[in-house]
Amino acid sequence: MTTEKSKGGRPQKYPYEELRSVLFEYANKNSGKLITLADLGRETKFPRYVWRNNEKIRGDIEKLNQTPMAIVGLMKENVKIPSAEDLVNSNYHNKNLLITRVQQVLDAYQTTFEQVLKTTELENRLNTKEKEIASLKEEIDALKKQSAFYQEKYESMTLHSTSLLSRKNFQLKENVIDAEKKFKEIDDEFEDLFK
């Protein structure tokens, strides 16, 4: 039983990663031009049969030929967008291919424009949410201060309710901390537990 990693036999002479990097260099140099196996064989260090026999590379070549902007999706760094002069010069004798290439550039522009609009909308929403968060944090801080103030008032009233004179001064009816009353309640609960 063989695995995908080691199929046995002779190791590949031309690894996919190396072919792919050479393909992207070629596509970057010849942006806007149709990529053919013959041109790759002529202008790179690999013969034509190497490009023809590698299915993954052929798939990448097809993607690049469908749209020169596909290179952006396949290779994220060092992308060269074809200039108008490159497009016209490389497709001068084939009007249909020139129209196709210009349409591909316009489609890429439209897609990029839509992404910019979405990004702008998301940035606006993010700014709105950040403002809401800042407002809510201020509100939380104010409520914490208010809570601390009332906690302090409650503790002060509790202490003042212990003496008769303080209760008269602060107009309190009864002692909030009544040890005998609390003890009686706990004692009753305790007795109820063992009935």
Image (cartoon, helix red, strand yellow):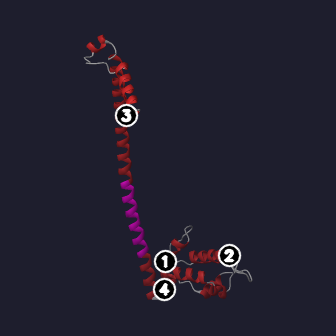
Q: Is residue 126 above or below residue 157?
A: below
Q: Magenta region: which residues?
A: 106-125
Q: Earlier in the sequence, mark 1 or mark 2?
A: 2
Horizontally, is 33 left or right of 149 in the view?
right
Circle 4 is placed at which residue position?
Answer: 92
Circle 3 is placed at which residue position?
Answer: 144
Three-letter amino acid code at the position of disc 4: Tyr
Q: Earlier in the sequence, mark 3 or mark 4?
A: 4
Three-letter amino acid code at the position of disc 1: Glu
Task: Give SS at disc 4.
Answer: loop
Give the Cα separation between the discs numbered 4 and 1.
10 Å
Give the Cα separation between the discs numbered 1 and 2.
45 Å
Q: Decide whether residue 63 is among the magenta residues.
A: no
Give the Cα separation between the discs numbered 3 and 4.
73 Å
Front position among marks 1 and 3? 3
Name the disc covering residue 184, or none. none
Answer whether labels 1 and 2 touch (C-beta < 8 Å): no
Front position among marks 1 and 2? 2
Quadrant placement of the C terminus: top left
Three-letter amino acid code at the position of disc 2: Lys
Front position among marks 3 and 4? 3
Give the Cα separation between the discs numbered 3 and 2.
61 Å
Residue at 41% from the left image edge and 71% from the top image edge: 111
Circle 1 is placed at which residue position?
Answer: 85
Q: Earlier in the sequence, mark 4 or mark 1?
A: 1
Q: Is residue 129 above or below residue 30?
A: above
Circle 2 is placed at which residue position?
Answer: 5
Q: Is residue 78 above or below residue 186?
A: below
Local crowd size for mark 2, using a 10 Å CA cut-off: few (<14), some (14–19), many (≥20)? few
